[in-house]
């Protein structure tokens, strides 16, 4: 039980400045599927499940931001990490995950589609490259409980659709988040949020394309830290971004995704720098 409490604490409060003791303020209750934690003061709705292998998995809506997190992983040393994930008998999907302030917690780049996949339950495998002793790959195999209501509650709390046909479009995107036939003419160049104390953060945004290369209906899929202003900064940058077709014609209609890593610079004259991926 002590291990489970630590993992749930990490899932609920994997944000800078949140003391572990605050986890006791979240109301815990047994759910018919996944367990639920709700904390109205923090605008938190969390569906979570804990496994005997030490991992905890959670889907949470916190202050309007949706995230899927895994806790209990081998500590990471970089800001991102690669996880290979498979459901049932499907092939493994190489995914980039973001590392929280707690290096044992990873945050998904594409949380909504992943949460919708997890609702089905069943066999779930996670491979952590170099996570075992001697640099060997570490493999987790779990029987994921199905969720008939808990994950849906977290999605709805953040106004995320319970069914979204665009998930298939996201799966078809290249590593750069773009379809194979288009590229950036002008990449988004977000400005580091003013007055923030966080030294780093990230935001992942999806948009719909237009024939003239502009984007519309952009949505912050996830960001961290939640109250860092990084999602808003990334959205603001989409107004100046432009796409182009590789064949010189109109940009085909579809979905794109881009991610921005924010890193604060110590140079007083500039105040910040950032990298976009």
Image: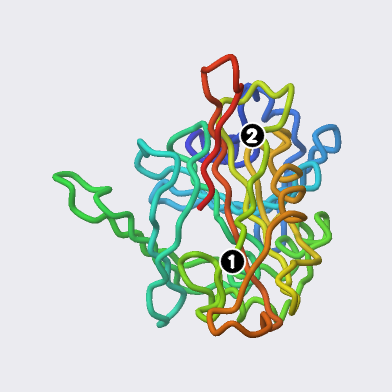
Q: Residue at x 55, y 37 (%)?
A: 274
Q: Earlier in the sequence, mark 1 or mark 2?
A: 2
| Spot occupied by residue 238 in the image (x, y as percentages of width and height) | 72, 55
| Spot occupied by residue 75 in the image (x, y as percentages of width and height) | 36, 37
Along the line of sight, which residue is nearer the eye, 76 or 250? 250
Residue at which label 1 appears? 114
Q: CA distance from mark 1 to mark 2?
A: 20 Å
Left or right of 277? Residue 115 is right
Colour mode? rainbow
Seen in the picture, residue 64 relative to 176 is either above or below; the reply is above
Residue at which label 2 appears? 13
| Spot occupied by residue 271 in the image (x, y as percentages of width and height) | 61, 22
Along the line of sight, which residue is nearer the eye, 228 or 76? 228
Left or right of 118? Residue 180 is left
Along the line of sight, which residue is nearer the eye, 239 or 106? 239
Seen in the picture, residue 88 relative to 40 is either above or below; the reply is below
Q: Quadrant of residue 16?
A: top right
Along the line of sight, which residue is nearer the eye, 200 or 142? 200
* Secondary element type, mark 2: loop
* Secondary element type, mark 1: helix
Q: Quadrant of residue 5?
A: top right
């Amino acid at each position: 039980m002590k291990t489970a409490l630590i993992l749930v604490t990490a899932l609920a409060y994997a944000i800078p400045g949140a003391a572990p003791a605050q986890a006791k303020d979240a109301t815990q209750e047994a759910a018919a599927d996944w367990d639920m934690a709700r904390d109205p003061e923090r605008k938190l709705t969390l569906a979570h499940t804990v496994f005997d292998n030490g991992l905890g998995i959670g889907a949470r809506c916190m202050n309007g931001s949706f995230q899927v997190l895994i806790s209990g992983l081998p500590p990471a040393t970089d800001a991102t990490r690669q996880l290979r994930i498979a459901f049932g008998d499907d092939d493994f999907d190489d995914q980039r995950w973001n590392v929280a302030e707690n290096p044992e917690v990873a945050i998904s780049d594409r949380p909504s589609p992943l949460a919708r996949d997890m609702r089905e339950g069943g066999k779930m495998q996670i491979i952590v490259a170099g996570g075992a002793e001697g640099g060997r790959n570490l493999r987790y195999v779990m029987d994921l409980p199905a969720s008939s209501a808990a994950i849906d509650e977290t999605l709805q709390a953040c106004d995320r659709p319970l069914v979204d046909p665009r998930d298939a479009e996201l799966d078809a995107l290249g590593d750069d988040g773009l379809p194979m036939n288009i590229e950036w003419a002008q990449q988004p160049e977000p400005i580091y949020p003013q007055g923030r104390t966080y030294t780093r953060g990230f935001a992942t945004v999806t948009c719909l394309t237009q024939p003239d290369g502009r984007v519309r209906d952009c949505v912050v899929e996830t960001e961290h830290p939640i109250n860092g202003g990084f999602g808003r900064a990334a959205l603001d940058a989409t107004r100046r971004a432009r796409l182009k077709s590789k064949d010189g014609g109109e940009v085909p209609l579809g979905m794109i995704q881009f991610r921005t890593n924010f890193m604060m610079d110590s140079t007083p004259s500039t105040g910040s720098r950032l990298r976009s991926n």
